[in-house]
Image: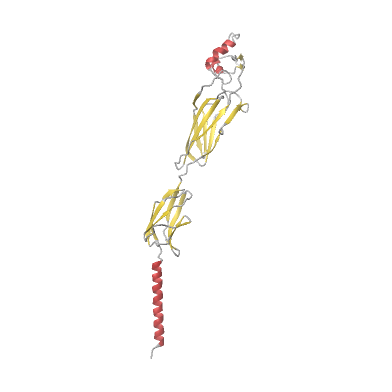
Amino acid sequence: MEDRSMLTTGRQLGLGALLTCAILVGAGCNPTPIVENMTPTQGTEDGGTSIQITGQKFKVGATVQFGGQSLTPTNVTKTSMSIVSPAGAVGSVQVTVENPKQKRAEKQMSFTYLDTTAPTVSSVSPSDGHVYAQGAGYEDAIATGLTQITAKFSEPLASATVAVSSASLPDAITGGYSGSVNGATTVSGDTVTFTASEVFASARSYTVSVEGVDVAGNRSAAKTTSFSVGTPKRLHRYVVQEGDTLQSIAARPDTYEDAEAWKKILLVNQDYNEINRDAPQAGLGLWLHWDE
């Protein structure tokens, strides 16, 4: 007679063996991936960097977790796969591989987004096209009090350059002037300041070119603007100030705008017998003759 207890035990052993085999086979079909290397490990912040990941036990259908984003790799083999970096913020993110059924590699790689965005000019003061008019921007034709140009950028800078040139306005009394403006440029965070060596003269237009380099070495495009210090009202009588000479008086934008015209001043005011051209008396009123 057949021993039923032994038959049942045999069946149980056979079933257990089959289950054990199935578990082992299943584990072999869905292994935990092993990440060994990734190249390159850095790229631009706007994405688009081609990356290759190498390792072991990669499976078709795997995904790459890239800084919190899930990417579908291409050219997947057991030992390698390819991805393209998405856009991201400057800094480092973690990268790892995940096989189907959430088998994630223990090792994570680090990818660094580089700052490759050039800074831009946000604003320039004086603004483009601004006109400083006499009485509403400056008072004295010589001592205008205007010396600074400032520019704001989209991010902090490491360095900056400011180039300034000037030219006579069309309605200047004499005109014909053009040249560069000397000065010093300083950088503080995202702000650039140009301070002219001398005040901006009246009856002139000024062209400004600004560019900057951020801390990552990205250079901005040059920003060009212009402003002007209006031509002052023409004087018919000038009161001598302390330190004036006839040449400096004649060179003023509101007199003759020509130092050599001092002789005309002397001729028109010849009734003053003791005019010292190098040091005329302060407070003396001098008439200016104009050919109408």
Give the tally of numbered discs: 0
Where residue 11 appears, as percent x and y from the top left, is 40, 81
Where residue 287 appears, as percent x and y from the top left, is 61, 14
Where residue 196 appears, as percent x and y from the top left, is 52, 29
Please say if 190 is above or below 58: above
Say which quadrant the N terminus sits in.
bottom left
Single out the residue that lies furthest toward the bottom. Answer: 1
Where residue 136 appears, as percent x and y from the top left, is 62, 28
Can residue 277 be seen?
no
> Would residue 146 be found to the left or right of residue 76 on screen?
right
Residue at 55% x, 30% y is 227
> Would residue 226 be found to the left or right of residue 81 on screen?
right
Residue at 41% x, 69% y is 26
Please say if 59 is above or below 138: below
Say which quadrant the C terminus sits in.
top right
Residue at 52% x, 15% y is 260
> Would residue 201 be found to the left or right of residue 52 on screen?
right
Colour treatment of the image: secondary structure
Can residue 22 be seen?
yes
Residue at 54% x, 15% y is 261
